[in-house]
Amino acid sequence: MSYIIPTDELTIQEMSAMRGRAQVAAKQRASRLLSVPESSLEFRHAETVADFGCATDQWNTTPLAVVNNAYSVFPAAAGNPTLGVRRVAVFYKVGVETVPSPVSLLSFRQGAAAGTTRAVFDLEQLVNKTQVDGYFSEVVVYDPQEVLNIVVTCRIATGLLARVILGCWIVEPIGAITSS
């Protein structure tokens, strides 16, 4: 069961523990899938250009034109990106910078035609909080070469991009982007 836990409702220790569990699970999965020892893997925050083919290193959705429609969290140029052959992506939190929050749901799907839904998070749980961000009760992991179809549902049609910032780590062998 996946749900969002507002950051306002978590202690620093709980947030740290959630990140730690996410890192352990992701490193084990990446080690198994990439057939490399865990010690040769590196964690880094996702880069929207390098990892998802976006035009800018910013977390922007496509323009929100119609209420109740789904819009990609990746700008139109990226479409539904395919994860690199030696990378595992683990999503663990979300923040909505655009005020008032123009989105209601965050859906993690796999496949260009929205084939498999992995998780859906109700972003309206964050609207009345001091901090408009939260952690996922369970991380969402994408394996190498999977198509990331991640969308938000529009609740306020602005015709503009929305800033929906995903907490995402990329796990990959050391040296792909960073070095030891």
Image (cartoon, rainbow, N blue to C red):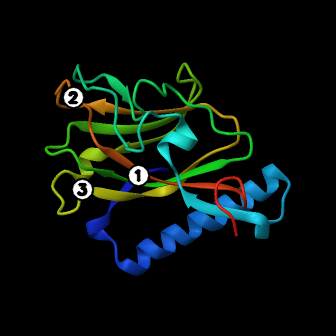
* Whole-percent x, y for residue 131 in the image: 22, 62
State which tag comes first along the sequence, 3 or 2. 3
Circle 1 residues within 10 Å: few <14, some 14–19, many ≥20: some
Residue behind mark 2: 160
Residue behind mark 3: 132
Tag 2 secondary structure: loop
* Whole-percent x, y for residue 55 in the image: 44, 33
Which numbered mark, 1 or 3, is in the foreground of this view?
3
Above or below, 113 against 58 in this view is above
Tag 1 secondary structure: loop
Which amino acid lies under the numbered mark 1 shown in the image of this protein? Answer: Tyr
Residue behind mark 1: 3
- Apparent side of residue 22 relative to residue 48 in the rendered image (left or right): right
Q: Residue at x 50, y 75 (%)?
A: 17
Residue 151, image quadrant: top left
Circle 3 residues within 10 Å: few <14, some 14–19, many ≥20: many
* Whole-percent x, y for residue 33 in the image: 79, 49
State which tag comes first along the sequence, 1 or 3. 1
Which numbered mark, 1 or 2, is in the foreground of this view?
2
Q: 77 or 20, which lies in front?
A: 77
Which numbered mark, 3 or 2, is in the foreground of this view?
2
Q: CA distance from mark 1 to mark 3?
A: 15 Å
Q: Residue at x 67, y 39 (%)?
A: 84
